[in-house]
Image (cartoon, rainbow, N blue to C red):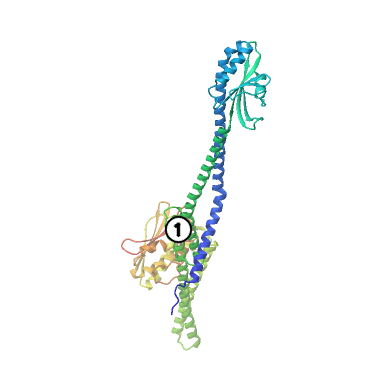
Amino acid sequence: MGCVGLKNPEKKQTKREEKLKKRKVASGIRRRWFKSILTLMAAIVILVGVAFSVANGIYTYSTMRSSLEAEANTTAAFLRSYLNLDYEECYASCVLLVQNYANRDRLELQFVGSNGEIFASSYGPFADETVQTDDVSQAIRTQDSVYFVGRNPATGERIMSVATPMIYADGKVVGVLRFVTSTKNADRLIVIGMLFSIGVAIGVLLLVYMSNRIYFRSILIPVAQITETAKRIAAGSYGVQIEKKYDDEIGELADTINDMSNKISQSERMQSEFVSSVSHELRTPLTAITGWGETLIEGDMNPEETKRGITIILREARRLTSMVEELLEFTRIQDGRFTLSVRQCDLRADFEDMIYMYGSRLRQEGITLIYEDNDDEIPEISCDPERMRQVFLNILDNAAKHGGEGKRITASMRLEGNQIVTRIRDFGPGIPAEELPHVKMKFYKGSSKARGSGIGLAVCDQIVQLHGGTLTLENAEGGGTMVTVSLPVTQ
């Protein structure tokens, strides 16, 4: 019987590890966000809330004070006509005004004597009760209205008052007109405003937190996936791709890593092909040298066969030497130790001599090398003639290897503006269009089956660049490959 309901423990462990990694990334970014953005937002919201509460308190108390002062001014103006009467009549008028005060439901109207004793109040009789706050004494002393906010020492209640002096006809202060109101309602409104601002602040912070949480999830999950894929690439899984879900910076990052992964994979593949190719290229001449060496040691050959064997050994030894030198040149380029030995040189004369010598060799292989002469006056330039000979020989060798089936190669050198332009063309099959952008890359051989290490053109391109020039390859019209080397006349 089979087991039912069992799950792969390794798969569960992998998923658990992935979740932990994502949480670790999320917690790190979220922690930094809390320390920076959310802390700043909280500080701003708190400051705004405090500012609103303070402004609300100031406004509320200012409104109350304005109302009291307006009431006091109106009543004081009404009483001025009574201040010309004698004291008894004035007192009787004040008591009558208090008894008939219309706003007693929200304000207390008091008449206070010069000794601070309350002799009339809209709230009822006061038996020898005195005002214990200093607004009355200040009003008498300054003969001006005085504003007071604080606790009533007698009751402990918070009050607001405006005391206005009553000045008799002879300039003597006979009493104080005082309006008093409780700040209980105002304080309650201020507290409500503070609670409202706190609620709004909490709501804003929650809204910011939740919106940013959603936003972070839209970033952290792709970032965690990209991080995991980048680690896989670093571990050797070259060529692995990230699924692109967004057309923004995250998507651009995914494209960049995907491109990097492809290029690393391609580079690894080319290096493997290079090692395989070099191994094959080294094995072939070594096999010939070893075979002919063993045959020569036996000594059973006639002079003609011996000469042939020695010739093959020399040819293959030169081929090995050439390959080793090419590898050494490439190593120097990679290490930055590649240098030029620059001097004044008649590049055209050197090129024509090389064409003549190389043409003789190509004729033995059934390939015709045609030099297209012209009357251009090509000046001497500062260059490394040995390196430039290496470039031209490598290009001609590639033309013979890859385009030799066309049985024809053309070469020319012209002066075009301030550039000496050398063109070498074969009439072979050309280079596939998709391979053209890569042919100068190190280790790249493309679909060609011809012998070679795949680094010759990379070395040539570096030499030409060090001379301030350019090396380009393109498929020529009518078939074949055109290689163009452009060097500046003045450097």
The residue at which mark 1 appears reads as 254
Q: Is residue 444 above or below residue 216?
A: below
Q: Looking at this view, name the residue that lies furthest to the right.
A: 115
Point out the image quarter for the N terminus. Answer: bottom left
Q: In the image, 332: left or right of 157?
A: left
The percent position of residue 327, horizontal first and vertical second, equals 50, 68
Q: Is mark 1 on a helix, strand or loop?
A: helix
**Left or right relative to 43: residue 352:** left
Q: Is residue 260 above or below residue 40?
A: below
Query: In the rendering, at what x and y percent does residue 283 appear?
Result: 47, 77
Identify the residue at horizontal 60%, vertical 15% (top origin): 92
**Camera-nearest residue between 378 and 226:** 226
How packed mark 1 is, by other alpha carbons closer than 10 Å (few <14, some 14-19, many 20 or more), is many
**Residue 35, horizontal then vertical, whole percent:** 57, 49
From the top left corner, tell me how far across and down residue 70 is, in percent: 55, 22
Going by the picture, which residue comes out furthest to the bottom?
Answer: 300
Q: Which of 194 and 429 is in front in this view?
A: 194
The kind of residue tagged 1 is Ala
